[in-house]
Image: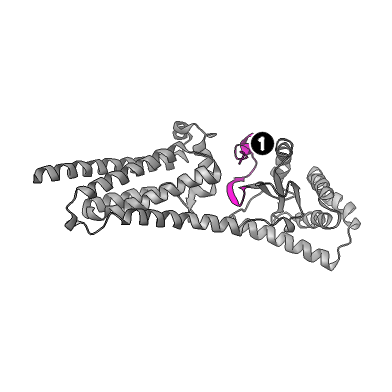
Amino acid sequence: MTQNNIAPGQTLKKLLYVAGFFGVLLTIVTELSHIYPVILELCGGSKSGCADVASTPFAKIFGVSVAYWGLLSYVVFLFVLYYAPVYILPIASAMLGAEFYFMWIMSSIIHIYCLFCLVQFFTVLLLFALTLGWHIKQPGNLMPVKLWVAPVIALIAFTALAAPVKLGAKAMSTNGSEIVTYWGNLDSKLRIEIYSDYQCGYCRKVEPEVDKIMEKHPNILIIFRDYIINSHKISPVAVSYANAVAFTKGKDEYLKVRKELFFNQKKLYEYLEKHLPTIDFTDELKKKIRQKVDYDMERAATLDIYQTPSLVIYRGNDMVQVVRGFQSYDQIARFLTAE
């Protein structure tokens, strides 16, 4: 009778080792796919869901790739499995909660799916099921960890990861009343914030792509934010002029001036010398401009944006993607899916 009780437990324990080591291998392959394109081909290449998910802000936690966090989780799990197996249930539960968080991100926030992530989810799900089965096989008086802790720990892990996302989204939400430099529908759930500098060559290059977004997504909201690059000496003047037009002459005139500034990028000084006298820069107007630009720069820092152009895509209050540097319309459009 004793042998019958032990054998199933030993078999499950061996399967736990197999699942754990497979998870280690999977996390290593996932991280290497970010470095070596040939590995990314296993997931569909540079235009796959894997590549898109990897480029979202959710691909890192505290600035560290989630693949490294996953690797750490598997290593800890295997260590405890070897030295103190009766305590593996809390670890497996926390890992399951984290995987539900990533599935929630993909299904509800970014609407993009990564093959590696899906395999990871089912690996952890199997690991948790085997852990639960192994615990059930053990004599009750030898188990310091009760089965009821599993859903509690999983829920705590999920909440700990999901809560900052929702709170951060609420903090970064935009009130329509504060927007003066924009195009489109202020009530749209799909929103793009474009951070640009009038002397940035790539910002000028991305303008035709922005025009395509406007043409093909007429119900979207595009908010134009200023990010002044320190080495660009004329940019602060251009920003002041463009925003002055927005505050004094309205959105439509601002959009016209914005295009003119980029079109005349190589002779920006001459353009501004001609047009600046048309604006009466009162103290109140200067204050409004300063507050608006400070807000844009602070918001960029919060989003870890330090280059132009950068496009931040939101669905509702949830940030979907940060597109850094020049990208074509086709590359951007992948993130502009319907609600």
User: What coloring was used for the rendering?
Assistant: one colour
Q: Is residue 62 above or below residue 200?
A: below
Q: Which residues are magenta?
A: 313-339
Q: Is residue 302 visible?
A: no
Disc 1: CA contacts within 10 A as few (<14), some (14-19) or many (>=20): some
In the rendering, at what x and y percent does residue 20 appear?
Answer: 30, 44
Image quarter in which the N terminus is found: top left
Which residue is found at the position 63% from the left and 44% from the top? 325
Residue 219: say if magenta: no
In the rendering, at what x and y percent does residue 229 appear?
Answer: 69, 54
Toward the bottom, the furthest residue is: 283
In the rendering, at what x and y percent does residue 55 appear?
Answer: 54, 44
Which residue is nearer to you in this view: 191 or 324? 191
Q: How many marks?
A: 1
Which residue is found at the position 48% from the left and 50% from the top? 60
* Helix, strand or loop under label 1: helix
Residue 212 figure quarter? top right
Residue 336: say if magenta: yes
The residue singled out by tag 1 in the image is: 329
